[in-house]
Image (cartoon, grey):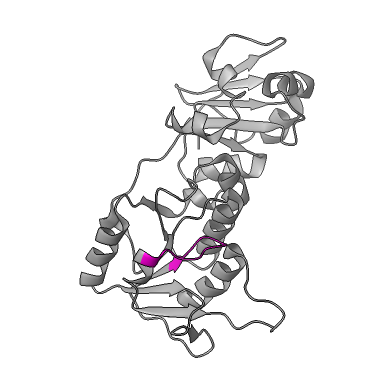
Amino acid sequence: MLEMIEIVELDSLTADPLVQKFALRRDSEWESTDEMIIDSERVIQRAVNLGIRPKAILLTPQTLERHRPWLSKGKDCKIFVATEKLIESLVGSRVHQTMMAIADRPKHRPLSSIGPSAIFLNSNNDPQNVGSIIRSCHAFNVSTVMYDRQTCSPYARRSIRVSMGSVFWTNNVFVEDTPTSLEQLKRQGYQIVAAHLGPQSQSLRGFRFQEPTVLVIGQENSGVSKDILALCDAFVKIDTSESIDSLNAASAASILLYELSRA
């Protein structure tokens, strides 16, 4: 928890650099600052409970009163209170969340930090899918999320919100060189299994995950890239109705993660 409270009441737009950051919309703008923005009361509270220390919090007076029992401030955090109308003027659009926070992005974790089961996201560029998959990882106690450069950052604004804060529970590992990293894990005894529709794919109904395992989920349209498929020990598919050729990435990952958690 944060330790004490300092309130800055805003009655007009201010030149304070922290306040102006709440107007940034593009994820690329946040990545250049090594910071992130967190939306929604529940997600911010969960982030704080999991050790995230906001630099700034922007909220309405009503929201402040709802959360005063736990809201407080460390020495490097400011809490800005403004009307919903003023917040909308700052962010340039209608506000659906009356509480936002800015914090430093967690540092990249090394490959050596992964646990006995992990998911690897290959070219998943939809932040909603990434956030949903991370939430499923938390639900099924798969603690490590690996992701490559072509995958949307787990700390993108929408990824954080859709994950409902689970992104601050998972061990998120950025993989710069995918083939080298997967080969290293194979030497350490990890089974590399890709969700893939192909002639060598095994039905999930009869497939048994081993431990340790890395489950690979590819891009929703093109699937897992060929260079990664060449490194996999097995391919698994989810049997569906004949009228449905496949599930979206988040739905498929949720089913596979449940089975992986039973290994």
> Image quarter for residue 42?
top right
> Image quarter for residue 33?
top left
Q: Residue sitting at 71 percent across and 19 percent down?
A: 82
Q: Quadrant of the C terminus?
A: bottom left
In the picture as drawn, the residue positioned furthest to the bottom comes out as: 206
Is residue 171 inside the magenta stretch?
no
201 w.r.t. 25: above or below:
below
177 w.r.t. 4: above or below:
below
Left or right of 231 on screen, residue 33: right
The region drawn magenta spans 216-226
Q: Residue sitting at 25 percent across and 74 percent down?
A: 189
Left or right of 156 on screen, residue 186: left
Is residue 217 inside the magenta stretch?
yes
Give the image location of residue 208, x and y in percent: 43, 86
The answer to whether residue 164 shows anywhere in this view is: no
Give the image location of residue 239, x and y in percent: 60, 83
Give the image location of residue 205, x and y in percent: 54, 88
Q: Residue sitting at 69 percent across and 29 percent down?
A: 64
